Image (tube, helix red, strand yellow):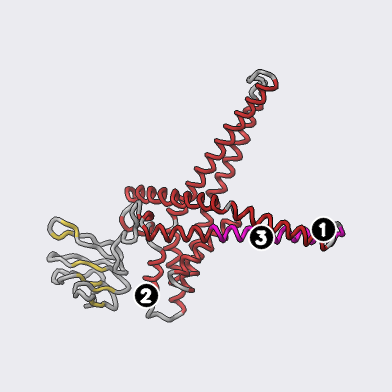
Amino acid sequence: PQFPRKKSISTLQGAHYVGKHSMLFEDGRFRRGPGGWVVLATSSSRVVDESSSLSFRTGSSKALRYLVDGRRPLADRKGSLDHLAPRPLLLSTVRVVVVQASTTFGTFVTDQLEHETDREELVKKGKKSPEEADQENDEWEQREWSVRWAAFPRNLTNAMLKFHAVTLVMRFYEHLASKMCDEIILDRLTKDTFKSALRKRDRLASDQTQSRTIDLGRNMFKTCLWANAIAFLADGTVQQIILGYGYYEYYRRRRAHQRKQRSKSYGDTNNSYPDGQNEQEDTLHMALSFALKSTKVLFSRSVALVVASTGGAVGTIIYPGWGTLFGTQMGDGVAGSLLE
């Protein structure tokens, strides 16, 4: 049956869909389709409104509530330790390995091209012969290739630790959001963009016009912007913690080194800064440097969120699902390389 908005469903039985293109599930209980809410009918009269959330009671317990795609709110939300399950752990490990290997190889190629360009400039100016330049290029390539891949295990370990730290911080922020936001907002913040792209593709499959592509891209941009907000916030938080700890360790070791040098040179640990002015200037300089870098991290993560969401939307238009993930990663990578 087709029900217009704001229609009494007091006589309906089972779960019915509000909107166009209703279809019966195999179990004979549910109907769904694009354009409205899936609702669970009760014996009491209820006004159906597609634009709002439906939450009503049957007896003493709430009835189930379904979204336009037949999915319950928060169905995509993951548990605090779900990323440590065998399959997600394997997939995340492979992803981190591929990203880290690609980063190592990419930086090597970029530095190699820059090094060869510098050698070519020296050859053009007559400061080196072509043979000397080629020999230096070969020596640089062999040396740097070994050095960078020798550091790969350590870099991979750091990347894995950072990934799991970001994931735990993200789950913590999701928990805070669950205390502060309603169910619909929390559902947007915890939505799986891969699954969402496939659901949107299926809903718009019957529309072959150009507006379908525009709607799909626009909707996925909004979805990616919401769904990636907490992840980028968590990543920025971890970067801020690492940055702050790095500055703290640098400052502590520097002060310890200065005290040690004063003790060796003068036998007095209190004469390095006669009036305390130089010490204050040094502390102020480090605080200013930390504030600038901290602001840069905040700005770069904010811009990266928008660029990554745009990449996810473009990727969804090209190939919903995997294209969404690839576009998001590409957008994040481009923003990171330009701003960080």
**Label 2 Cα crowd, 10 Å radius (few <14 / some 14-19 / many 20+):** some
**1 or 2: tag closer to the N-terminus:** 1
**Would you say residue 231 sits in the magenta stretch?**
no
Amino acid carrying label 1: it is Leu
Mark 3 and mark 2 residues within 8 Å of each other at the beta carbon: no
First to last magenta residue range: 100-126
Amino acid carrying label 2: it is Asp
Amino acid carrying label 3: it is Thr
The secondary structure type at the circle numbered 1 is helix
The residue that mark 2 highlights is 202
Q: Going 30% across and 70% down the picture, which residue do you hit?
A: 36
**3 or 2: tag closer to the N-terminus:** 3
The CA distance from mark 1 to mark 3 is 19 Å
The residue that mark 3 highlights is 110
Q: Going 14% across and 55% down the picture, which residue do you hit?
A: 60
Q: Nearer the viewer, residue 87 or 26?
A: 87
The residue that mark 1 highlights is 122
